[in-house]
Image (cartoon, rainbow, N blue to C red):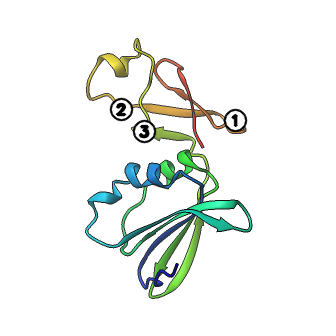
Amino acid sequence: MTVDSIEKGIVIDHIAAGKSMDIYNYLNLGDLECSVTLFKYAKSGKLGRKDIIKIENMLDIDFDVLGFIDPNITVNIIKDGMVTKKCVSLPDKIKNVVKCKNPRCITSIEQDIEHVFRLSDRERGMYRCVYCEQSVNGG
């Protein structure tokens, strides 16, 4: 399979196999009016299998979302055919990426309250709701 290189855009690489659709949906890539290419389960010497997303346009990416979904992702920003790499990591805090599952949490009762989670255990990728301490796993 051959996909042309891009002169300007973003390549999200080293995505854990099968997680590219999560990223596609979180970043609303289906709403873009440019070329977006997904590779699922591509061969990788390092990972065995991986996913890749190529976006033929520049856009603001929420690196916290990417770090929450998979902290091992590499983002290649391409301008004039030149590549700049940016690695992501687990963010210290995430807003409105996931919803608190605690039915008694203020975010479940009141509308228009941001869903905010803080990283509580980096080793396990564990986050806790700032309002009720409900835990959720990232990565």
At mark 3, the secondary structure is strand
Instruction: Report, in whole angstroms, how far the alpha carbon at label 3 lies from the one at label 1.
Output: 19 Å
- Residue at image position (64%, 55%) is 72
Instruction: Report, in whole angstroms, how far the alpha carbon at label 2 lies from the one at label 3.
Output: 6 Å
- Residue type at mark 3 is Lys
Q: Mark 1 points at which residue?
A: 124
Instruction: Report, in whole angstroms, how far the alpha carbon at label 1 lies from the one at label 2.
Output: 24 Å
* Residue situated in front as seen by the camera: 124 or 30: 30
- Residue type at mark 2 is Glu
Camera-nearest label, 3 or 1: 1
Q: Quadrant of residue 104?
A: top left
Q: Which mark is residue 95?
A: 3
C-beta proximity under 8 Å, tags 3 and 1:
no
C-beta proximity under 8 Å, tags 2 and 3:
yes
Q: In this view, does 118 lie above or below 54?
A: above
User: Dot 3: few (<14), some (14–19), or many (≥20) neighbours within 10 Å?
Assistant: few
- Residue type at mark 1 is Arg
Q: Name the residue under label 2.
A: 114
User: Dot 1: few (<14), some (14–19), or many (≥20) neighbours within 10 Å?
Assistant: few
Q: In this view, does 37 lie above or below 120?
A: below
Asked if residue 112 lies left or right of residue 27, the reply is left
Q: Is residue 82 above or below residue 111?
A: below
Tell me the quarter of the image containing the C terminus.
top right
Camera-nearest label, 1 or 2: 1
- Residue at image position (58%, 39%) is 138
Q: In which quarter of the image is residue 99?
A: top left
Residue 103: x and y, percent?
40, 14
